[in-house]
Image: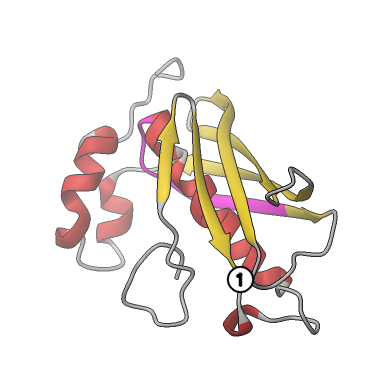
Amino acid sequence: MGCGPQNPHGLHLVVYRSGDTVYADVTFDERHIGAPGLAHGGAVAAACDDVLGFALWIAGAPAVTRSLTVEYLQPVVLHRSHRITAHVATREGRVLHIGATGTDPEGTTRFTAKAVFVVVTADHFAAYGDVAAFEHLLRRLGGNGASSDPES
């Protein structure tokens, strides 16, 4: 839905890392319409969840979203690029607090997002489907299991 190329209605995000942040540029179109000329809040939330999830590369751990809060500060206009930038705010054991902002090319913050992620092991994903396609990614993130060390 977020970054995968197979879904023709997906967001096709390409995420980059710069130091302790990750970012992606997204342009919503008619596939993501809410009110006339504006992106649907659910499409904005999906983009935020995806970019926030890429901050897991910074944390170095596979995790799942526990909660996601998006604040819509300004209308998110269709056919206009928006940059979503995310960073890990804090880590408390297995719990990661990750924040993001969505800005337009003029630097106006259109939305913000906060999420809580919980670190899991690869077994969590294997319980629901075949992880062979992305098992190498899970190993790069945190091996076959998540660290129980709250400082890591």
Give the residue pinned by disc 1. 28
- Rendered position, 145 above or below 132: above
Placement of the C terminus among the 4 image quadrants: top left
Asked whether 28 falls inside the magenta stretch, the response is no
Identified at 14% across, 60% down, the residue is: 132
Residue 133 in percent (x, y) is at 17, 61
In which quadrant of the rendered view does residue 56 lie? top left
Residue 126 in percent (x, y) is at 25, 59
Identified at 53% across, 54% down, the residue is: 25
Q: Is residue 132 left or right of residue 145?
A: left
Placement of the N terminus among the 4 image quadrants: bottom left
Q: Main secondary structure of the magenta part?
A: strand
Residue 31 in percent (x, y) is at 58, 84
For label 1, the SS is loop
In which quadrant of the rendered view does residue 39 lie? bottom right
Q: Residues within 10 Å of mark 1 (few under 14, many from 20)?
A: many
Q: Nearer the viewer, residue 118 or 71?
A: 71
Which residue is at the far front?
A: 106
Q: Is residue 60 left or right of residue 9?
A: left
Residue 2 in percent (x, y) is at 46, 64
Coloration mode: secondary structure
Which contiguous range is marked in magenta?
A: 60-69
Asked whether 68 falls inside the magenta stretch, the response is yes
Q: Amino acid at mark 1?
A: Phe
Identified at 31% across, 57% down, the residue is: 125
Q: Nearer the viewer, residue 96 or 20?
A: 20
Identified at 16% across, 47% down, the residue is: 136
- Rendered position, 9 above or below 107: below
